[in-house]
Amino acid sequence: MRYSTLFALSSIIVGFTPANVDHSPVTTAFKAPVYQELPLGAVKPKGWLLHQLQIMRDGSSGHLDEIHNKIKNDNGWLGGKGDGWEETPYWLDGAVPLAYLLNDAVLQQKVLRYINWTLDHQRPSGYFGPLTKAEREKNIAITVNNPEAGEDWWPKMVMLKVLQQYYTATNDARVIPFMKKYFQYQLQVLKKCPIGQWTEWATSRGADNALIVQWLYQQTKDPSLLELAAIIQRQSYPWTNWLGNRSWAIDAATQQDDHQWMHRHGVNVGMGLKDPAVNYQRTGDRRYLDSLHTGFHDLMTLHGLPMGIFSADEDLHGNAPTQGTELCAIVESMFSLEEIIGITGDIRYMDALERMTFNALPTQTTDDYNNKQYFQIANQVQVKKGVFNFSLPFERGMNNVFGLRSGYTCCTSNMHQGWTKFTSHLWYAAEGQGLAALTYSPNEVTAKVGKQQQPVTIREETAYPFDDQVQFIFQTQGTATFPLQLRIPSWCKEAIITLNGQPLRRDKGGQIITLQRTWKNNDQLTLQLPMEVTVSSWGRNSRAVERGPLVYALKLSERWEKATDEQEGSYFSIFPEGAWNFGLLEKSVKAPAANFSVHKDKPVTADFVWNLEHAPVSITTTAKKIPAWQLVDDVAPQPVTTREGTYKGPTSTEEETITLVPYGCTKVRIVAFPVVR
């Protein structure tokens, strides 16, 4: 598999037993991130990415508090008795960056209601959050002497991420003292009320808590914060141990019962990916990074799917193309990768982030961003009510359809952080007062650079990931001397870089390059990343067609049907128009360049939407139908192949031309193809 190759070297660890990683504090120095995050709002979306965020603002991201009763009614984060757990912070974790990325005053005022209430109602002890049952009914003050009168640590972890983003956008002077006070409270009471006092969700997600503690340490250098972060990590799930211990990923592939199921819960895993990096940041112990490399390699080998995410329906569930993936698992894995990238500077996670973002993310919401799909399937030949081969068979069968409230509504509230945080992490501050472009999309960044801290704006114009050119246009007053770092993706054999139309350099893929020079106003730097069609191997001897960061899927016309469920409201089913049971020809798989044709069908305009109508690139090839490949229990189980990877059963004698389009533009599709002769 592609990820097996990508991470093969990293999984060879000399003299280190991953299972023996110690969660206790290590007496080595705190490691500053390789790349520092820029303040929220320093990066502004442009082009198709701006349109995507505008759709979100006009749809559920900007109005969830009006259309989702759980947040709308008597909200606990506004002092009411309603939602006081995760869904309101989840929504804000995407709505806050959206408000400041778009500089939208209306949305800023909306999210400020919740931020202001939270900041203004911190208890004298440092505790914060919605009023607890003990406070409301017994008028009990929550202090360090009775922390058990408080409530779950977990939703506070999400709200801390909200406040951290808000602070970088506004420098609101209330935030840092608020966090100091709360973390001092935590430090004093965690022995009596540990992270798992109320729910196992908090135990599984403690790395999110430690992440913000260590962010505050970078602002204040208060050593007690490192002590607190170490305590939180010791009381939380030992994700570092599990990721480094290969039996964890193997066991998760074989066990689907209720025994320790939260250890393999896909969203927990997505959040837990950052745990080794957070531990490394606090300690400087590189064994944590070795554990991360091993764990991510094993995770994607045993559970990985072509669109760049692992199965999570809800548990890790192997690599069959008919397994599902929860939307929350995607956006949480993206955030973990963004944090891992900043802390480690490792290009492998940058490649993984783009693959996940441009393939898995866009397909799981409707064009207007008002409906989501709880579970997506790689080979998804229909979208309908049903139980399917998932480890969480809801009795109402609503996990696969598109609706605002279909499945669990955690994803309804949490999906908003995907595109917004990806946008804010397109650029990072780099060593030498420079800037680093580590993932690519149309945007504009403004920052102070170089020894003179000179302001510079760089406009990034591109149709990436559909096109292979990224152009950077510099706006400075006079000249600005600073290093610019660019990622050359691992899938690119050789990048071509020109400056003002003149050749500058060529660089092999799989590295970060640094351009140290004096930049002038209106300089135009062009990064060309030639994209070749390749074929990668995935579960059950299937093959996926790729070009650059995109995976391509069979184009099927879609028939949408709207219906209503009594408990979960309106929803959409989607059915294919046309045959889907094709196998790729063996000759095409062996020689992609000669047998796949790339077509630039239409430009990527400012009104681009991830759907079939707007798909700007297609790939054609010839294929044969497999008559015996049919639906079984409403899914399309992969045909059995030989060890050599070919299907030996009857196929149609006629070769037909099929069209492939970017996976993210599809709702029904085949992406993991059998191979036929």
Image (cartoon, rainbow, N blue to C red):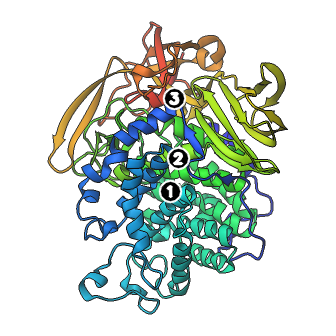
Question: On screen, 394 above or below 19?
Answer: above
Against 361, residue 295 (above or below) is: below
Q: Residues within 10 Å of mark 1 (few under 14, many from 20)?
A: many
Look at the picture and state if 561 lies above or below 437: above
Of labels 3 and 1, the one closer to you: 1
Residue that protrudes farthest toward the left in the picture: 566
| Amino acid type for the residue under numbered disc 3 | Thr
Q: Secondary structure at mark 3?
A: loop
Identify the residue at horizontal 59%, vertical 76% (top origin). Answer: 234
Q: Is residue 134 above or below residue 483?
A: below
Give the image location of residue 396, x and y in percent. 21, 49
Residue position for label 2: 303
Tag 2 near tag 1, CB within 8 Å: yes
| Residue found at the far top of this picture | 654
Which of these two is toward me, 182 or 323? 182
The amino acid type of the residue labelled 1 equals Ala
Question: What is the crowding at mark 2: few (fewer than 14 residues within 10 Å), some, or many (at least 20)?
Answer: many
Q: Measured from the top left, where is residue 555 in percent x and y?
A: 42, 20
* 2 or 3: tag closer to the N-terminus: 2
Q: Are marks 3 and 1 in contact (CB under 8 Å)?
A: no
User: Which of disc 1 and disc 3 is earlier in sequence?
Assistant: 1
Residue position marked by numbered label 1 in the rendering: 252
Q: Nearer the viewer, mark 2 or mark 3?
A: 2
